[in-house]
Image (cartoon, rainbow, N blue to C red):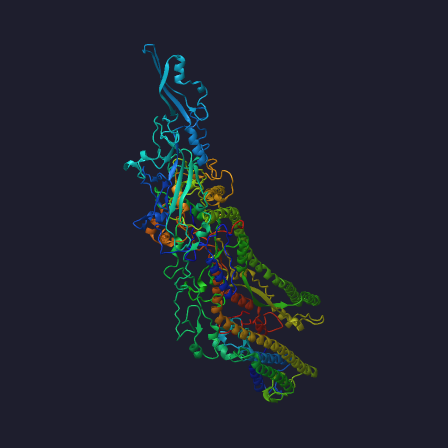
Amino acid sequence: MIRRPLLLWLLTLLLFALPAVGLSEPVVDADVALCRALVEKTLSKEQRLYRSVLFGQKKAKDAPLNEVRFDADGIPWIKEKEDIWRSVSPGYEDTEWSDTQMNDQSEFPARKGIFETRRVSTSDLVPYLTQTYRALKCRSTIVCKIVENSLGQESAEPQEVTVTVPGCIEEKRKTFPGCHLLAAERSKVEEADLLTYCRLVRDGMVEREKDLLKMTTEYDASYRSLLQLSGQMDAFLQEFRWPLMNSLRKTAELVGTLYRIPCFIASCDEAPPVNAE
Amino acid sequence: MHVRLKIPLLIVAGLLLATALLARTASAITIDEPVDFTAVQQNVGEVRGDLESAQCGGWDFNQHVQEKIPTVMGAPGRKGIVMDNDKLMPEVAAAGLAKRNETTGALEDGFVFPRSGLATGWSTVCRVNECGNSYPYIRECPTEPPCRNPDECRQLCADLNAWQRRHQSCTAEEWDADGNLILFETMEDTSPCRNVDNGDWCQPGDEGWVAVDIILQDMFPNADVLCHVDEMLYCCSNGIVDDRENDPERNCINCNGDGLPDRNNPGFDFNGEVPADLDKTGCRKGKNAPNSREYVSIYRRYLVSYNRDAVPAVPRDDTERHDVPVDCYCRYEEFDPKLRRTNPPDYRCVIMLEEEEKRFKKMKETQLGKGKYGQNSNLPDPAYKHDAARDTRKDLWVNNFSDAFSLLNGKKIQESPKDNLFPLLQLDNTDIMPTAQLDQGRPFSSGSLIRSTDDSVNTYNPGRRVITEWWQEQQTQAHKLFTSSVLRLILPTPVSVGLNLSDPFLTPRSSSSQNARPANQQIIDIQIRSSPEDLLSEVSAYLQNGLLIHVREEPVPLVVPLASPVELRALAQGWKRWGEEQEGEAKTKAEMAAQKLESYAERIDQVRALRGELAKYIGRLLTYQSTMMRAIGEWLTENLEAWERYAAVRQQSLDLKPKWEKIQQNYRVFHDRTNMPWCRNDRFTTPTYSFLDNWMPGPADPRDLMLNIDDPPANDLEEEKLPRLSVKMLPDLVYDFTALRVSTGTVLLPILTPIQIRLKQSLFDPPAYYEDLAQVSEQLEELSNLPDLPPVPSIYQEVLDTLFPTKVLHLSSPSKVNPAIADLPPEIEKVMDRISKIITEMDETYKEFWESIVEYPEKDIPDKKWDCQNLDVMPCIHTEMDLLERFTRIGARPAVQLWEDVESRGPLRTAALKDATAATALPSVNLVPPTAVPLCPREDWACQVLNVEKTFAREGWRVEGVKEDTGKEDLVKLRNRLRQETIPGNSSSSFPYTVTPDDMLPSFNLPSPITLPTTRFQQNSASP
């Protein structure tokens, strides 16, 4: 995977360094595979954003060992030890980041997730959850629309376009240079394939996230109800255990004592008579 | 004998004797467990009713015992001394029976004999079969009494006096015609004994005796025979016969009174009469006959009277009898029953209750009456401890009215926040405490300490009561036999086992907690009396469940190549095919490529070996479990044997239980029925030693009243010893698991989760046959630079070495039950048989006595009812030597406790335990070795002793389970290592996966544990 800044630099260099080559068109480094990769990357980022909104993102130092995070450039980092984050990306194999660096470079800031809200019932959370889901749908659709727009671009620079998706806020986004296929050699089939691909991936992801959200909400609702119940149960036990248990115990003792009505024959050590006389 | 058993915890100030008489059935009231307060009230009412209907008992401390012990006149025997200067003598208080007077009397041994008028009878000097011809009287004790009833005796006496001899002294004189004496012969002779009534001669052949005058006359027919002495003499006494009815020196004369000269009063007997002036002779000591023989009484009649003061609590108290005739047969023999055993021949007196008004039939009704039994007590009821004084300003419940209940404090309710249910949820903590018997200072009533007593009380050992002490000691020993030992299961503190006892449901907070440690840190000491069969299996089940190792899977991701070996081999084949077409360098390169692909194919096969990794180390976990199971099993097996021994010995003991219950039952019957023909109190009467015969073991002559009571008990079976049980209690069983620590940590089980990633197939495609080297050189170059497939990583050795604990069980087993438990000695059963025999015979002895007083007179026997048919045959069963004591017993006061009764008591057991001086007053405490450990003074107590509790140093199993956090670091290292080894680098010489390393890395993400929110009452964290 090639990083965008580098690509841009390269392009710029090409643009400036080889004007005399006579390439009337700037060299666009775009092809189908690249565009696909871009699609995947962007969509996965959307998914990660959505997940972080739902479940929250901890600070780097609170993250458990072996957690993988992405930085702003989309490079994955794994927490190898306390305060040490590593990557396997080319050029970063030997780099170590500390927790603060990870925090600064993280693609999303640390936040508290919706499901982490306490003292509310799940029903109160549902509007926010649905809104998040809708946001996911919108944003993932926007990504595919951007790709669509990018396909018709010729320049090597990302262009700003206004994306309108029914039901979502109008957004101004930059196109993906890697998908400017108009200038590159391609066929119509590949173009259509790209669009289909984006849509398929997006639909699949959204569908899956929808089902997961449903399940998660169900679980959350049942757990919160359990908490409420157990809270009451605990309060009950806490308040009642001492009088209840004590009174029960004392009653049992008392009944036992009463049962031993004293006998008035001179000695009360007798076993019952062998034959009733 | 009045033996009463005391058990320390009599609940009521236990002076109440609700005795059942023969007329009613003896049954304790039965009370069912109350289900509500109404039932409690009903039960109390039943108890009250039962007390009301009691016939005797209770106390009257305004009355004293003086003058209420019967004074008996007209019977021989010894009196008892009770008071000294109006106070109870200490030795009488200790013993419970009077001190026998052994200083007065003619012989200064305490024995007194009634005076003339009260003691009458017949005395004779004749001996049985004196004539040799079965005359003058045939029967003699001990085989048969000479006469069997007063009339017979009178007749016998009259008949005896018929035996006379003729004493003649005659002279034969003859004169001639001158009046000169020519013959003068004297002859004197006494005839042999002859019965003048019927002409029987004493000896056969005596008939031939001829009277002297006849002989003389026959010898000198012409002489004048003159007898100047021609008298009849009584045969046995040589007294002159004058008036057969009244002569003072007949064969058989009346006797009256004592007759034995008093040492301290010369010339008089102890009753103040002159022996020589007694009418004919004294019954105790007869005068001498002319032939120096002594008159011995063969029949005596005593007219016995007794009287005493009445006890006011008994309205119809029958306090006296006058002139009860007692006939004693056989020759008078004086002896002291204390010094020798009485034998059947000594039972020779009949208490003649022929006259109705002298009988004791009505005593059952007349002696009814009970004193106070606490029904009007003004003691507060019952005694609570008032530590919790309620403060109306602070406490929710206040009890300013009484102790029984408390009311809600209205002010507090108002003050409490409205939405807080706390006040209403807070129930009142009424403390229920055991009640004192009397009051706070006297938790136990001293009424429970009144001493039992028995007829073995004697002046040689003042204060000792052998039979009582023996019986109470046997009770304690029998308790040791039948008390099952305690099984102690000592479990470790809850924290070490993983139980969180601070959870309020498991450990209610007790307001009077004596332990300073929090609940989590207290050792649990469970005492179980469960049946042995189930317990061991329960213990082992607990152990098995508790010792399971917790296992948690930890995924360890790694990247493995995914390819089909078949396909790779096909590709290699393709390269070979192309290589065949080429030559030189191209060929070798093609070969290399093919080889490389082949090696890849082999390596891929090895990926499958990864599956076996898990199996290699997971087996180790099973080894741990099996080690523990085996240890538990071995321990179980070892203990099972000991367990079975224990159970067997216990069963032997329990087999003896019905026998012991029967013995106790016999004793109860003796105490409540046999010795209680009517309501009576034997305390402070005189000990009657003839009642000890013949059930008390020991030598006959001299009598030993102490026997082996102070020797160490040894299951004695000898005839001359008291059978004393010596029982060793089964030891307590202790299973000490305090050192047990089950694993609180979890074993981390790494599970390989391979991430299979495809190889870049495009790189391996062989070229078409027409392509030449130049076209594929790049590809070849790349191929040749390809590294080998990374070796399949193996982690099992690392896991076994670092992640798993190496030792799970620390084998120091908990203490085993000592298998050397001795069998129950067979002597125990035999001793019990002997005890049973003693108690049964004791019962029979007293029963016979009372039968002769109460039941026999009422029987309808037309003929010879009051005859002494034979010695020791009803009604001829009383000894003569303690008639006075017997009548003291008969006339004893009714069963209401008086002031001095309570003074006859022993110390509380707690006092004896704590106070050395109190303890030394008890003889059994000073015995070496002690008769009971722990201390249970047999003078007053029968106890149920328990084994001494021991606390051991910690020993037992320790399961070195997995500590928390074991293996976490190693796991992290393992993960990192595998990640670094299997994610390829970014260079072109790194492995040709289809996916870049950047894309592989997210798969190594481990989800973090989710912390679920909790309530404010508990800390809860769920693991993933």
Q: Quadrant of residue B272?
A: top left
Can residue B5 be seen from the camera position used here?
yes
- Indicate whether A66 appears above or below B322: below
- Indicate whether B465 appears above or below A252: above
Q: Nearer the viewer, residue B89 or A222?
A: B89
Q: How many marks?
A: 0
Q: Quadrant of the N terminus of chain B?
A: top left
Q: Nearer the viewer, residue B814 or A149?
A: B814
Where in the figure is residue B52, as x and y percent of width and height? 46, 58
Residue depicted at 35% across the width and 44% down the height: B80
Q: Nearer the viewer, residue A189 or A154?
A: A189
Q: Nearer the viewer, residue B108 or B461?
A: B108
Where in the figure is residue B134, as x and y percent of width and height? 46, 26
Where in the figure is residue B467, as x and y percent of width and height? 41, 44
Q: Quadrant of residue B769?
A: bottom right
- Indicate whether B115 appears above or below B29: above
Q: Quadrant of residue B779?
A: bottom right
Can residue B729 be seen from the camera position used here?
no
Q: Quadrant of the C terminus of chain B?
A: bottom right
B915 on left or right of B563: left
Q: Residue furthest front?
A: B177
Where in the figure is residue B242, as x and y percent of width and height? 37, 27
